[in-house]
Structure formats: structure tokens, C-alpha cells
Image (spheres, grey):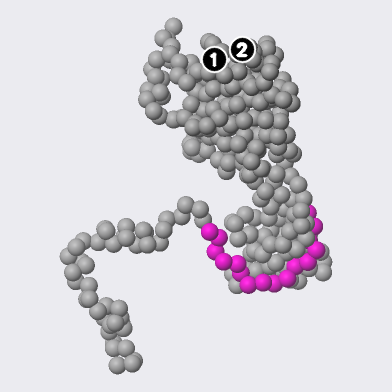
Amino acid sequence: MAAETTIDLATLRFDGERFAGHALDVECTQELVAYRRIILECAKALWCRHHPDRERLPKRFEDGFRLQFDRLEDGSARVPLRRVLATDQAPLDWGNRDEFDEAAQLIDAAIGAANDDTLLPEAFPSNVVLLFREFGRTLRDDEVLFTRARHGTTEAAYTVKARKRLAEWVAATYEDVVEVTGEVQMASVKGQFSLLTGSGQAVTGKFSPQQEAQVLEALRDHNTLGLRVRGAGEFGTGDRALRRFVRVDSVEHAPPGPPAYVEGAPDLWATLDAIAAKVPADAWKAVPADLSLRVDELIYGHEEASK
């Protein structure tokens, strides 16, 4: 049998009168099982996201994920959770972080977002939100379960508010009024159409016979003509992004919207500097110092008309 070692993953702290003297009721150990499942499913989703070219998880990725605790520490009932690893996996603890560490931190962030009424972390897998239904079921209203990933700097308080908020996020969508301008990408004879919004998201809906002419014209001239849609939309509860048009009250032509801002896109000047750095120094010496004043003469072979 291969030798094993353990490394820290996270700490769960049960806070409330019931946990005084770092005592833990037996039924509350269900929270450890639920937490493990959230960690595992989140880590699996993250690994697939990090390796889009791979069809399957690594061998024993799931079966090899074992958590243990061997004591309850002071501070209500504090449970330090440790991963069990074969000794040849020990380098994981040399300051490196893998999908399980990332999952633990994302869980802290998701709980914090629920408490602060902010959006879920963009990196948090949406399918994992459903698992919060089973997390915290043994807790009473006056009890709080704190989570803290091993690389985290603060605890995340899984309060009654956080549990309720995450349960609401499980309800996948809600409806609200909407007004959005975009580019018509598709329109069918059955009245279905797809609008590419400024955020780069395709939103589908159904137009009426009275709206058909404007939608089809916007489709035909989609490079120069946008479409403004007013009505009701279905939004994702977790990210508040528009999913589809539930009802289209009106459509009208509009100028195309500005290009969508892409988070993390390379800075233009940084890109130009990088290109310039690849040009040999001798080539730069050959560039005339007055190039900007003599563009027509030097590039097109004739002097500017103003001369």
C-alpha cells in the first residue's frame, strides 16, 4: 500500500451556543459531507475549464479526493479539513494551488457574495450552486458556519442570509423589463430572431408580424443597422445576465452600438510597444525623423498637395 500524507485544504468553524466548548453534534457532520461534495464538483468543473482539449478527468481525480479531520479546535467547534494524498503527490503542498484549492476559495467568495448581495464570482461554476441546497441544513437560525480556504485571508460567514440568498440563486431565472440594442444575427419565418448584444451575448426572442419588416431589414443590413428591442426579458439569477426575450413590445432601428469592451484585452499601446521591440535597432535608424510630415512623399512617392 502506498504511503500517504495529508495537507491542509480548509477550515470549517461552527458558531453558536450548541457548539460551546468545541462540541459538535453528530448530525452536523453532514455539513462536512455536503462541503466535500461542493468542493469536488467545483474542482471537476474547474479542471474541465482549464483543459478544454481533454474529454475525461484524470484517473482517480474523484476517487482520489479524500478529506479527513482528526480533532476539533477551540473557537466554538473548529474543524480543520486535510486532504489525504499519496506521498508522490506531496509536491502539491509546496505552495502550489490546484483545482481543489481554487474551489475552496471560490466557495468562500460565493458565500461572501451572498452575504453582501453582490454577484457570484464569475469563475464559480453555475451548476455547483444547486449543491448549496444540502449545505447548512442542520444549522439553526442563530448558528453560523464559517468557511476558510487554506490560502484565504478571512473567514466567510455562511449565515441564514447567505443560505437564503444562495437558495434564491438556485431558482435559475427571473423576469424584468428590458431595453437593449444589438445586431440581428438570425430571423426565421416562424418569427424567431437572435440579437447579438453589446456584451457579446446572443439573446433570442419572438417578433410579431407587425415587427417582421423592421427585423428583416436589420438582419439584411446588420453591418450598418442595429435593432433596439423593448419588452420583458428573462435574466439569470446568479449573474443577472439577459437570457432571452419573454415578450417583445416594440422594435426600432438604431445605430450599431459601440464595440463590446473585452475584459482583460491587451492594451493597445502595450501591444505596439511589444511589436516595436521586435524590430531590429538598425531598422529604426533607417526611419526618417520627419516621417509624419512626409508620409505622401516617402510612402506614396509624391509630395503633399499643400506643398
**Disc 2 residue type (three-letter):** Gly
Q: Is residue 194 above or below residue 26?
A: below
Which of disc 1 and disc 2 is earlier in sequence?
2
Query: To which quarter of the image does residue 225 belong?
Result: bottom right
Answer left or right for 6 relative to 282. right
For the point 72% across and 20% down, the residue is 138
Residue 251: say if magenta. Answer: yes
Residue 189 located within the stretch drawn in magenta: no
Distance between mark 2 and mark 1 Cα atoms: 9 Å
Which residue, given by chain and number where applicable, does mark 1 sit on?
73
Q: Secondary structure at mark 1?
A: loop
Q: In the rendered image, which residue does mark 2 sit on?
A: 21
**Of the pair 82 and 66, the residue shown nearer to us:** 82
Looking at the rendering, the stretch of residues picked out in magenta corresponds to 246-261
Residue 63 rendering spot, x and y as whole percentages: 54, 18
Report x, y in % for residue 13: 59, 22
| Residue shown at 54% from the left, 14% from the top | 73
